[in-house]
Image (cartoon, rainbow, N blue to C red):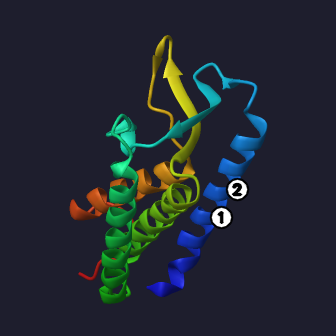
Amino acid sequence: MFKLSWIAVAVLVLDQWTKWLAVTHLTRGAIEVLPFFNLTLAYNSGAAFGFLSGASGWQNFFFVIVALVVAIVILFMIKRLGANDVQVAVALMLILGGAAGNVIDRLVLGYVVDFIDLYYGSWHFWTFNIADAAITVGAILLVLDSFGLGFRKRHR
C-alpha cells in the first residue's frame, strides 16, 4: 500500500504551503471568508485543542517524540495491509502526512502554525490547520472502517 504514499506527501506539501501563506499574509488580523469561517493566524505550542499549550516548553519535545513513534507504527501498519485495505491505507497516509506537517513546525519553529477558524456566533472552535484536518479525516476513516463502513472492497 505504499503506492498511496503520494497522499501523505500531498498533505505535507499542502500543509506547509498553507502555513507559509498564513504566516506571510495574515499578520494584520483575521480575514472573514464566510459568516462562519475566518482565516486567523495562531501559534499553538500545545497539541490538539490547545492541550498542554500552557506548559513550560517540555511538551514540544514530547509531541515530536510521540509523532515520530506514531509515524513508525503507521509505516509498519501500512506494510502489513492487504490489497483490499484501501480505506485504512488512505486513512493512515492522511494521518502520516498531517503528523509530519506538525512535526516540521515543532522542529523548525517550536510551535505549530494554525489558521482555520470556524465559529458560530461568538463560539469559536479551536483554530487548526490542514495537517490537523487530515489527521481528523484519517481518524474518521479508521473509525468508519472499524464499523465496516466506507470504501473497502469486500469479498463475499
Quadrant where the N terminus is found in the figure: bottom left
Q: Residue at x 44, y 31 (%)?
A: 126
Question: Residue 36: x, y in percent?
Answer: 57, 22
Amino acid type, callout 2: Trp
Say whether residue 57 is left or right of residue 10: left
Question: Residue 91: x, y in percent?
Answer: 40, 66
Name the residue carrying label 1.
13
Instruction: Tell me the tag on residue 17.
Output: 2
Label 1 – label 2 distance at C-alpha: 6 Å
Say if mark 1 contacts mark 2, CB within 8 Å: yes
Q: Residue furthest toward the front?
A: 56
Question: Residue 79: x, y in percent?
Answer: 36, 88
**Residue sitting nearer the eye, 33 or 70:** 70
**Residue sitting nearer the eye, 142 or 51:** 51
| Quadrant in the rendering for residue 135 | bottom left
**Crowdedness near tag 1: few (<14), some (14–19) or many (≥20) residues, C-alpha within 10 Å:** some
Say whether residue 104 is left or right of residue 139: right
Vertical order, 111 against 28 (above or below): below
Amino acid type, callout 1: Val
Question: Residue 152: x, y in percent?
Answer: 35, 72
Q: Residue at x 34, y 50 (%)?
A: 59
**Crowdedness near tag 2: few (<14), some (14–19) or many (≥20) residues, C-alpha within 10 Å:** few
